[in-house]
Image (tube, coloured by chain):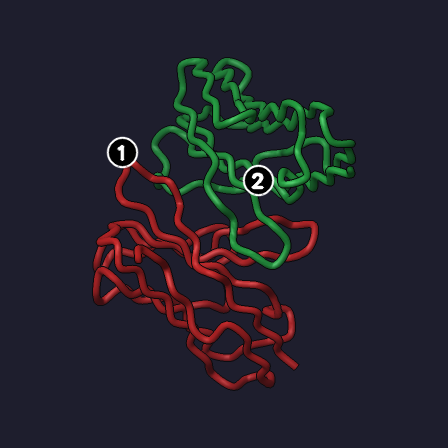
Chain colours: A red, B green
Amino acid sequence: EAQVTQNPRYLITVTGKKLTVTCSQNMNHEYMSWYRQDPGLGLRQIYYSMNVEVTDKGDVPEGYKVSRKEKRNFPLILESPSPNQTSLYFCASSLSTLNNEQFFGPGTRLTVL
Amino acid sequence: QQPVQSPQAVILREGEDAVINCSSSKALYSVHWYRQKHGEAPVFLMILLKGGEQKGHEKISASFNEKKQQSSLYLTASQLSYSGTYFCGTETSGGSYIPTFGRGTSLIVHP
């Protein structure tokens, strides 16, 4: 089944404890991206990647890191999480520039205490 | 920069029509529309490319006015299943080919 998977789905952590949210797609998509969703603010883009080893900042990249060492994986790293990073995170992928329908993962709900 | 969606919320009865608007301050290459049910991920509805194209998906259609940098989503004869939050995502010319999403429009359809 073609899909985008994220792990974990739910995470409660404490301020300053490094964490990684994994994202993997099995559709051989070139493009991958991370969004955070907060009430009233919609989906805001954190980082995106247009290919392996090619990443760029979105609109709200502060406090986040990403890497794209393999085409299928695009982990989101929070080196020192803070309470303002409490949010619902979505990973998405799309095939190419000519067909860029976004396929979203199920989401990861993160709470930072 | 996020596109602006209006209205923020719409409440309808089954069978009524609704229009959701999306506007950008920058020249647009394309507009995406997605629907998100509560507790779920956004799901793709359609993409419109510049050229004033109109597309349809069941009783949901959309238009794209390149000159006005706007798109509108039309929901005809609303069904209960149409309830959710609708997001437009815009790509600007020379951009990353990954859409920037608006804040969403909450649509509630009552029996």
Provide the chain ID for the residue under circle 2: B
> Could you give the CA–CA distance between mark 2 and mark 1, rounded to whole angstroms?
21 Å
Q: Is residue A79 above or below residue B94?
A: below
Q: Which one is in front, A113 or B78?
A: B78
Q: Secondary structure at mark 2?
A: strand
Sort mark 1 into few (<14), some (14-19) or many (20+) by Cα contacts within 10 Å.
few
| Residue B3: % across, % down | 57, 35
Q: Is residue A96 above or below residue B24?
A: below
Residue tagged 1? A98
* Viewport quadrant of the C terminus of chain B: top right
Picture residue at 69% right of the left edge, 31% below the top: B6
Q: Give the side of residue A77 with respect to residue B33, left or right.
A: left
Q: Is residue A100 above or below residue B59?
A: below
Q: Give the side of residue A22 with respect to residue A70, left or right.
A: right
| Residue B2: % across, % down | 56, 40
At label 1, which amino acid type do we have? Leu
Q: Give the side of residue B30 with respect to residue A50, left or right.
A: right
Q: Which one is in front, B97 or B57?
A: B57
Residue farthest toward the front in the current orientation of the protein: B111
Residue tagged 2? B87
Picture residue at 73% right of the left edge, 24% below the top: B16
> Which quadrant would residue B13 be assigned to in this image?
top right
Q: Give the side of residue A106 with respect to residue A3, left or right.
A: right
| Residue A3: % across, % down | 35, 57
